Amino acid sequence: MADIIEYSLAQLIESGGVYQISGSTKQEIMSNIIDRLAGIPSDKKEAMLQAVIEREALVSTGMENGIAIPHPRTPMIGENEKPFVAIAYPQQPMEWETPDNKKVHTIFLIISKTPKQHLSALSKINYICQQENFLAHLHARADKNKLITVIEEYEAAWGG
C-alpha cells in the first residue's frame, strides 16, 4: 500500500522544490508558493491554500530561528500522488508570530497523504532546523541541490 512508504526529507523536498517567493502577507506568500507547485490542478491548489490559511488562523506555524512550517490540518493528496515539502524564501524576512519573535526567512510547506507522513516530515524538519550548519544554508538561501545534499548527509547520520 502506498501510504506505508516512508519518505526521507530529501525526497520530500526533491518533490516539492525550493523557491524564491514574493509577498508581504502570510496569505500572499502561501498563495505564491502553492501557485509555483507543478503538476497540481488549480482547483486542488485553491483547496490547499484555503486549508493552509485555515490552519494558520488556529495557531501560528511560526517556529524559532526564522522558520515557519505551514500545513493543512488534514491530508490533502490522494493515493496516487506523492507527498512533498516545498521550501520558500520570502524576498524579505516577515512577521509570522514566532515563539522567539524573530522574522521568518524560510518557510517549509508540508503536504502529506496521512497524519503519520505529516508527523514524520514535521519531526525531521524540526530536528534539522536545530542544526547550526543547516540554518546557515537557509540564511544563505541555498538552492535545492545544496539543501538536498546537506539533508542527505544528516539523514545518513541519523539513519533516516
Image (spheres, rainbow, N blue to C red):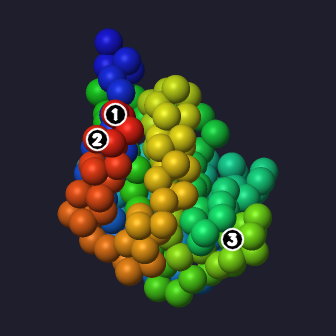
- What's under tag 2, amino acid-wise? Ala
Taking the image as drawn, is residue 123 in sight? yes
- What's under tag 3, amino acid-wise? Trp
**Contact between labelled residues 2 and 1, with CB atoms less than 8 Å apart:** yes
Is 58 on the left or on the right of 138, as rendered? right
* Residue density around tag 1, few if under 14, some if 14–19, many if 20 or more, within 10 Å: few
Q: Nearer the viewer, mark 1 or mark 3?
A: 1
Is 132 on the left or on the right of 3, as rendered? right
* Residue density around tag 3, few if under 14, some if 14–19, many if 20 or more, within 10 Å: many
**Contact between labelled residues 3 and 2, with CB atoms less than 8 Å apart:** no
- Distance in Å between CA atoms under marks 1 and 3: 32 Å
Label disc, if present, on residue 108 of the rendered structure:
none
Where, quadrant-wise, is the N terminus in this rendering? top left
**Residue wearing tag 3:** 96
- Distance in Å between CA atoms under marks 2 and 3: 32 Å
Q: Position of residue 55 (x, y in %)?
A: 69, 49
Q: Secondary structure at mark 3?
A: loop
**Residue wearing tag 1:** 159
Which image quadrant for residue 61?
A: bottom right
Q: Residue at x 65, y 61 (%)?
A: 63
Which image quadrant for residue 24?
A: bottom right
Q: Residue at x 33, y 53 (%)?
A: 151
Q: Position of residue 23 (x, y in %)?
A: 53, 81
**Residue wearing tag 2:** 156
Of the image marks 2 and 3, the number of the one nearer the N terminus: 3
Decide which of 57, 92 is in the foreground and name it.
92
Q: Is residue 71 above or below residue 35?
A: above
Most extreme residue toward the top is 1
Where, quadrant-wise, is the C terminus in this rendering? top left
Taking the image as drawn, is residue 40 in sight? no
* Residue density around tag 2, few if under 14, some if 14–19, many if 20 or more, within 10 Å: few
